[in-house]
């Protein structure tokens, strides 16, 4: 099956996400929220389980495991009452598997349409994505320069007591990508397919190794 390239603008509804298939490419525009903090993920789940609203609305939106450093962009001589201007210096993908314990609850509770990073998520998250109408985008590891070019502005920053990379930061992006649909909203996962392929080849590999040892 030939893969497609989708130019998407957030927020999205479930029907738009269900049109994505594993292997498709995505260029994404709109407001995305990012964090790589394990304490941040745990805090998000705790707040939601306690019935508390998060400081931003992520329904229909994207939550990515992308690292960034946000700095104040106002000059040193700016007046104290001047609006706080912020600048995101970069974006770089982080490994999503670290957040497996938290992602199913976040996907279901927040109505997320896109999640992503690198390395994928486990089958519990895949099941939650299938229920909610959510897809996982895989970003190019080492693609910091390319991804950073899409940043337009900092929309908001919450839980600022954390280091910059752990905060809940919302960025406005234009043509973020290309990213690969690695898990779609129909339960298909590149990572699970590769795992099954590797597992199916294991007996043959072990047999060949045993034969080599016996003949040497």
Image (tube, rainbow, N blue to C red):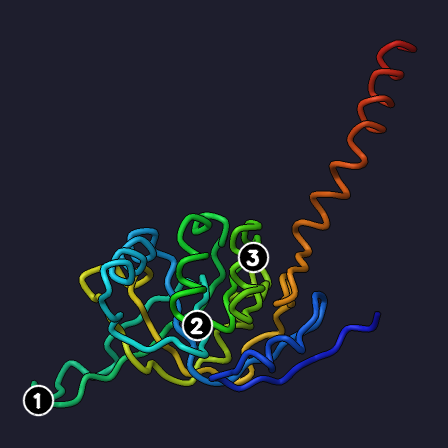
Label whose residue precedes the other's in the sequence (2 or 3): 2
Q: Which mark is residue 81?
A: 1
Which residue is farthest left?
80
Residue drawn at the location 53% of the way across and 51% of the way down: 124
Task: Give the vertical position of 158 relative to 98 (above or below).
Answer: below
- Residue toward you, 185 or 167: 185
Task: Give the spatial CA distance, label 3 vs label 1.
Answer: 48 Å
Q: Is residue 199 left or right of residue 96?
A: right
Task: Give the spatial CA distance, label 2 vs label 3.
Answer: 14 Å
Residue at which label 2 appears: 111
Q: How many residues crowd around disc 2 within 10 Å: few (fewer than 14), some, or many (20 or more)?
A: many
Residue 66 falls in image quadrant: bottom left
Q: In x, y percent, where is residue 204? A: 85, 28
- Residue toward you, 55 or 107: 107
Kindly state the secondary structure of the residue where label 2 is placed.
Answer: loop
Kindly state the secondary structure of the residue where label 1 is placed.
Answer: loop
Q: How many residues crowd around disc 3 within 10 Å: few (fewer than 14), some, or many (20 or more)?
A: some
Residue at which label 3 appears: 127
Task: Give the vertical position of 74 relative to 93 (above or below).
Answer: below
Q: In x, y percent, where is residue 178? A: 62, 74
Task: Give the vertical position of 50 relative to 168 (above or below).
Answer: above
Q: Nearer the viewer, mark 3 or mark 1?
A: 3
Q: In x, y percent, where is residue 162? A: 23, 59
Residue 87 falls in image quadrant: bottom left
Q: Is residue 153 left or right of residue 30?
A: left
Residue drawn at the location 64% of the way across and 60% of the way down: 187
């Amino acid at each position: 099956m030939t893969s497609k390239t989708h130019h998407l603008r957030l927020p999205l509804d479930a029907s738009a996400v269900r049109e994505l298939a594993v292997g498709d490419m995505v260029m994404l525009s709109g407001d995305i929220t990012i964090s790589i903090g394990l304490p941040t993920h745990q805090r998000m789940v705790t707040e939601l389980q306690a019935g508390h609203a998060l400081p931003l609305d992520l329904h229909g939106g994207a939550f990515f495991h992308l690292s960034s450093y946000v700095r104040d962009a106002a000059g040193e001589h700016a007046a104290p009452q001047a609006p706080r201007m912020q600048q995101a210096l970069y974006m770089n993908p982080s490994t999503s598997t670290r957040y497996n314990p938290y992602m199913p609850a976040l996907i279901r509770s927040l109505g997320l349409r896109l999640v992503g990073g690198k390395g994928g998520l486990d089958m519990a998250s895949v099941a939650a994505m299938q229920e909610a109408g959510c897809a996982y985008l895989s970003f190019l590891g080492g693609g910091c320069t390319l991804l950073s070019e899409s940043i337009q502005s900092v929309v908001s920053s919450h839980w600022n007591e954390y280091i910059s990379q752990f905060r809940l930061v919302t960025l406005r992006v234009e043509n973020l990508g290309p990213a690969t649909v690695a898990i779609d909203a129909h339960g298909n996962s590149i990572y699970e397919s590769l795992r099954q392929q590797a597992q199916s080849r294991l007996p043959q590999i072990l047999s060949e190794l045993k034969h080599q040892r016996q003949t040497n």
